Image (spheres, rainbow, N blue to C red):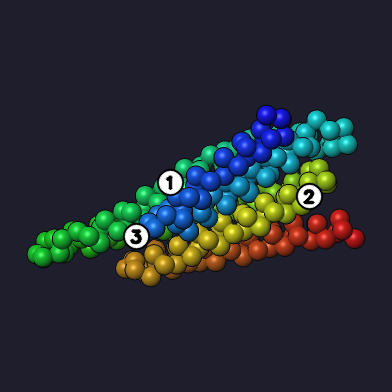
């Protein structure tokens, strides 16, 4: 088999498993896990552009900073990979809590407390996804300024994916907040999520502006 054909086979075989799991007729992995995966892909594109820039004479002034950004992206990617699984597990925990018996007063109390704990965790997991994806986006915005200009479109795609991760996480958060009784927790989380969305929109627009400047 020729080298290009081998590369195509490896690429083709590497992209199907997670997508197939999502496509199955089960509630998880779902949108929360997909949001975290978007964050992973965004970080991967950032790492790629770092690799395409480091060692090139034209970008010698950027190299020291990129050598710091790259491991930061690797760290963020590793945690976002974990959140793919954690999001699915948190959803399953909510479903399990709702299935608890409720025949007696004691059972109803236990069930309610368990549901509230599970819902809170199902908020905290996608909140981490949003926060870490915003960190990825911050680094991508910096790479757009100092990285290899030939790969600026890849940075822009990464920025869009990171913003999607933040937005996607916010949908899961909103759904679960509607069922949480602790109103202080609800209002604090809503404010935090609104800030993350606003910041992600601003940063994505800044990367988009950068690519528009390159076109002109």
Q: Which residue is mark 2?
A: 152
Q: Residues within 10 Å of mark 2 (few under 14, many from 20)?
A: many
| Residue at the image position 31 percent from the left and 53 percent from the top | 93
Q: Which residue is mark 1?
A: 85
Estimate the x, y position of residue 42 in percent, counting from the top left. Answer: 63, 49
**Circle nearer the N terminus (1, 2):** 1
Q: Residue furthest right?
A: 216
Estimate the x, y position of residue 149 in percent, counting from the top left. Answer: 83, 46
180 relative position to 20: left or right: left
Q: Which residue is mark 3?
A: 119
**Circle nearer the N terminus (2, 3):** 3
Label 1, label 2: how many angstroms apart (C-alpha)?
A: 31 Å
Rendered image: mark on residue 53: none
Secondary structure under tag 3 reads helix
Q: Residues within 10 Å of mark 3 (few under 14, many from 20)?
A: many
Secondary structure under tag 1 reads helix
């Amino acid at each position: 088999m020729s080298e290009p054909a081998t590369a195509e086979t490896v690429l083709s075989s590497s992209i199907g498993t997670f997508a197939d799991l999502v496509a199955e007729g089960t509630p998880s992995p779902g949108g929360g896990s997909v949001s975290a995966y978007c964050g992973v892909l965004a970080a991967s594109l950032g790492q790629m552009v770092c690799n395409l820039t480091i060692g090139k004479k034209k970008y010698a002034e950027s190299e020291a900073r990129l050598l710091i950004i790259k491991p930061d992206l690797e760290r963020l990617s590793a945690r976002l990979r974990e959140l793919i699984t954690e999001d699915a597990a948190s959803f399953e925990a909510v479903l399990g809590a709702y299935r608890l018996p409720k025949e007696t007063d004691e059972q109803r109390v236990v069930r309610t407390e368990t549901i509230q704990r599970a819902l809170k965790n199902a908020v905290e997991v996608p909140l981490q996804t949003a926060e870490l994806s915003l960190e990825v986006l911050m680094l991508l915005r910096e790479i757009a300024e100092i990285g290899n200009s030939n790969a600026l479109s890849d940075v822009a795609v990464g920025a869009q994916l990171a913003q999607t991760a933040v937005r996607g996480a916010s949908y899961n958060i909103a759904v679960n907040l509607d069922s949480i009784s602790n109103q202080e927790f609800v209002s604090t989380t809503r404010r935090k999520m609104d800030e993350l969305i606003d910041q992600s929109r601003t940063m994505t627009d800044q990367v988009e502006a950068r690519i528009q400047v390159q076109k002109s």
